[in-house]
Amino acid sequence: MNAPHPLPRIERLAIVGVGLIGGSLAAALRETGVVGTVVGIGRSQATLDEAIGLGLIDHGFTDAAAGVRGADVVVLAMPVGQTGRMLAAIAPGVGPDAVVTDAGSTKTDVVAAARAHFGAHIARFVPAHPIAGDEKSGPSAARANLYRGRNVVTTPVAETEPAAVKLVEAMWRAAGAVIHRMTPQQHDDVFATVSHLPHLLAYALVAQVALDPDHERLFSYAASGFRDFTRIAGSHPEMWRDIALANRDALLNRLDGYTAQVAQLRAALESNDGEALQRTFALARDARSDWLERTGQA
Amino acid sequence: MNAPHPLPRIERLAIVGVGLIGGSLAAALRETGVVGTVVGIGRSQATLDEAIGLGLIDHGFTDAAAGVRGADVVVLAMPVGQTGRMLAAIAPGVGPDAVVTDAGSTKTDVVAAARAHFGAHIARFVPAHPIAGDEKSGPSAARANLYRGRNVVTTPVAETEPAAVKLVEAMWRAAGAVIHRMTPQQHDDVFATVSHLPHLLAYALVAQVALDPDHERLFSYAASGFRDFTRIAGSHPEMWRDIALANRDALLNRLDGYTAQVAQLRAALESNDGEALQRTFALARDARSDWLERTGQA
């Protein structure tokens, strides 16, 4: 491995959306001393004032184009559903040398939006996804150690300038993160499988129970297995609607694969094929236990 | 509510399968002093000797018919897949006044097995399901407080003598449990929905990932949402094969309902119907949060 690219000082950093994700990045970078001025862009002046009060940013702007003016690096950290609109809003203010990156949980759609709204500046747009989160949200949830040891995936495309990718990766490393690079399509397929699909499946099970005439009795016998299986159905409906729509093609593909897997189990059950059921159950049990072992969660 | 039926003393209690479930019942009843002699029936003399050493039982038998001879109450607490075979094995030894009950996690199939193997004695067979468990198993996992405050479902049928039901319910109350009564069909539908179906769905997702050529990359990005969703896929494959087969009809029915719910979400996603997605996600999120609230898990 080469030594990590050192982070050139960022004189002016603009963060669009100073909540948990953007605020934590600002806090981490301020702690390392690699940033000069940090400006926040948001819809609500009250939130911006809160972020200033917390020391996350120096200045706040509700006008996105004005906010990004003069910034070396612009980080989009608002909900992924607003990416296209926000790219269009900042485009007039982004300087020719500025590097723009995002923190959205889907990437193919973000790349398409950047192509649509950024023209030639796509070369200095670096699609990225920090894999970190928290139950809490808003500026007050931000903390400098949120990204310590966490994964950040970058998904540069053919047009992306290598220097821009290196700068964004160095910035995330300075915040404590570990960098992985893949294509936008690989990224979206991976997260469709291990995150977006289980969310949709968990929502579907709770909806099935809730819509049943016998729902009171059903819920009254639900125990810890049901609770854990459906924990992710406690997530924000609007956010997951946006993620599902943003990652529609990969999610549909993985959902169809899942439906086929379930149909195989159904056929085994219907024909009383205990051996086939046990084979699949054991394969899953063993694979999961290996995964827990490998990742130190056993 | 009427006062709970007081428990007449059980002079001789026979427990078939002295593991976590049967051993804990023996321990709880011994602690209350309502039982005289407790005998254990098992396939392995070593396990029976261990149970004697732990003070759970007084005597051990590997011959099932001999073991149940003279018992007032016989409790079947071995894996549910062995119920038919065990009912046939104990039938020659069960006295005319003895009450027999079980602890299996499915009930329609247990009733069918009792009808097939017990003849007229079905009147004194009380199908029951204690909703309790633990990660550990075997006699050493048994503990007197396992059923304290836990639910036990009894599912008497038309032939069941009311006095036999009252005796079994009083026995479980003496062990600390709360009794619920329903039909075998209601029971099996409830547990197909809130337990057996999520197990099958969790096994299916892990199998889908494990069987993918890209499984290493996929697992390496799986995080806490995936871990919780699939926790129940860490369960014993043989046990869940048996439960799935034992509850085949109810499980197939609920699986089809689930598949229809997922198909609706798929259609909404494919047609970019964000409103429909959000409506179902929000319905599920709210129903789950109400359930957690009601059950003091919020």
Image: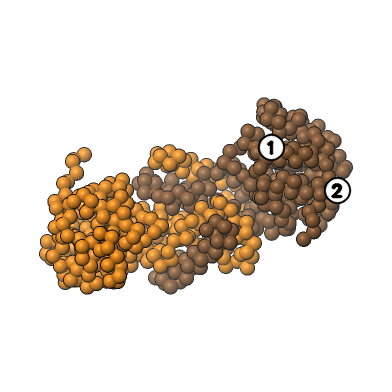
Chain colours: A brown, B orange
Q: Report crowding for label 1: few under 14, some 14 to 19, many 20 or more residues within 10 A (C-alpha).
A: many
| Disc 2 + disc 1, Cβ < 8 Å | no
In the rendered structure, find residue A196 and report the number of the disc placed on it.
Answer: none
Q: Which residue is mark 2?
A: A120
Instruction: Please say if B22 is above or below A104.
Output: below
Residue B48 quadrant: bottom left
Give left or right: position of B66 versus A173: left
Q: Secondary structure at mark 1?
A: helix
User: Furthest residue to the left?
Assistant: B96
Residue B293 in the image: x percent, y percent? 43, 38
Look at 23% across and 48% down and name the residue there.
B173
Look at 28% across and 71% down and name the residue there.
B45
Asked whether A293 or A225 is in front, the reply is A293
User: Distance of mark 2 from mark 1, alpha carbons?
Assistant: 29 Å
Judging from the image, mark 1 belongs to the subunit labelled: A
Look at 48% across and 52% down and name the residue there.
A229
Look at 29% across and 56% down and name the residue there.
B24
Q: Secondary structure at mark 2?
A: helix
Q: Report crowding for label 2: few under 14, some 14 to 19, many 20 or more residues within 10 A (C-alpha).
A: few
Q: Amino acid at mark 2?
A: Ala
Residue A53 in the image: x percent, y percent? 69, 27
Q: Which residue is mark 1?
A: A23
In what quadrant of the picture does the N terminus of chain B appear?
top left
Residue B128 quadrant: bottom left
